[in-house]
Amino acid sequence: MRLYVIVGGIALAIVAGLIAVSLLTGGEDDSTSATATGELAGSAETATLLRGIPQDGIALGSPDAPVTLVEYADLQCPFCAEWARGAFPAIVDEYVRPGEVRIEFRGLSFLGPDSQTALQTVLAAGEQDRLWNVLHLLWANQGDENAGWVTDDLLRGIGDSVAGLDTERMLAQRGSAAVEGEMVSSQQSADLNGIASTPSFLAGPTGGTLERLELTSLEPEEMRAALDALLDR
Amino acid sequence: MSQRALRAAVAVLALAGAAVAGYLTWVRYSGATIACTTGGCETVQSSSYSELVGVPVALLGLLGYLAIAASALRETELFRIAGAAVALAAAGFGAYLLVVQIAVIGAVCDWCLTSDAIAAALAVVTVLRLRAWAVSRTA
């Protein structure tokens, strides 16, 4: 009997210790908003939304997808964030995950210093094929324009919440030639296509000519109609 | 069950648990896509409850299962007590995490359920092993 008391006591002490630490560090788990314990807004949804979808640099989705959608956005643009929170998950679930559409991100940074820092970070994450995770988390945590919200603390929190991403490497590569080149390339692409506002979109057959999508709403319906027409369904 | 069979059962179950926890640990550090039938694995694995002071719970589970497997290496009192204590703790903490998944996170991870079942079975088998040893001592 004494033996069982000893074993039970040890087990109980271990479980009590583990649960106490878990409650103290886990706290109020709410995947949709930041909590007192530092849970990053959108981290769980972002991981679920993008889980298993191939990423390659600025591209999300299968390289064999018949249709390519290009998104031009500034990380401080509130309408871009609205699009990202509202329509983007539906487009990913309905078109990207099934392999019918791939999306390229063309980041612009015309709104100010926070735009540039955020964009450099997103593109640096693209060097590790995690651009879309960091991008979606920045939309979920977007602050007031040029209020200095793109802090290293926020970026570290975002980086640490993305599985497989080396946060320090991402931060170190923000000023790399590859990132700079991608920023210049996106700006040139925007100029070439007459992009004057964000979010703006081009779409067309992958490898073919992409056309400007004239959307009047940030809801997914118009985008669905445009993609369905391109997919001939 | 004979003492030998109980010892073998502990080893097999603990290694199975280590395989499950090892897979979750590998997914955690590699960023690989987790194979999942419940659809909730990623949500559970990215929640704040998947870590204890920065250490992934999956890694703690892996270490726990390896410790239980190691307890099957020798037939001494200390090894049996240690194996039973760790297995009971694993089952208890697993039960707590199951409640967290259902009541707090709102998503369930099938790998975690598998680990919970293995931990519960280990708790039973290690206690039976301890009991068999205690009975043989008093016989």
Image (cartoon, grey):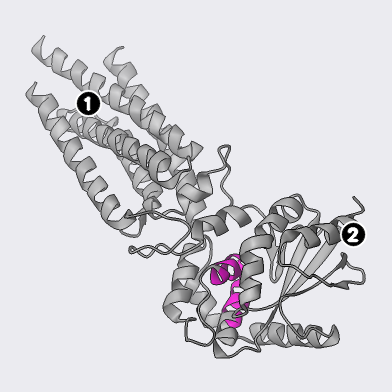
User: Can residue A65 be seen in this snapshot?
Assistant: no
For badge 1, the amino acid type reads Glu
Q: Disc 2 is attached to a residue of which chain?
A: A
Could you confirm whether marks 2 and 1 are on the same chain? Answer: no
Look at the numbered discs 2 and 1 and tell me whether their residues touch, using CB distance below 8 Å. Answer: no
**In the figure, A15 relative to A105: above or below?**
above
Element under label 1? loop
Q: Where is residue B80 in the image (x, y as percent from the top left)?
A: 21, 28
Query: Along the line of sight, which residue is nearer the eye, A144 or A211?
Result: A144
Query: Along the line of sight, which residue is nearer the eye, A64 or A75?
Result: A75
For badge 2, the amino acid type reads Leu
Residue A109 forms part of the magenta stretch: no
Query: Along the line of sight, which residue is nearer the eye, B58 or B50?
Result: B50
**In the figure, A60 relative to A6: above or below?**
below
Element under label 2? helix
**In the figure, B109 relative to A199: above or below?**
above
Q: Mark 2 points at which residue?
A: A230
Q: Mark 1 points at which residue?
A: B75
Residue depicted at 16% across the width and 31% down the height: A7
Q: Disc 1 is attached to a residue of which chain?
A: B
Residue depicted at 52% across the width and 60% down the height: A163
Q: Please identify the dominant SS of the magenta region.
A: helix
Q: Give the range drawn in magenta.
A: A119-139
Residue depicted at 36% across the width and 38% down the height: B99
Of the 4 image quadrants, the one containing the C terminus of chain B is: top left
As drawn, the label of residue B90 is: none
Q: Where is residue B88 in the image (x, y as percent from the top left)?
A: 26, 32
**Are there few (<14), some (14-19), or many (20+) residues within 10 Å of tag 1?**
some
Residue A123 forms part of the magenta stretch: yes
**In the figure, A66 relative to B74: above or below?**
below
Residue depicted at 21% across the width and 35% down the height: B82
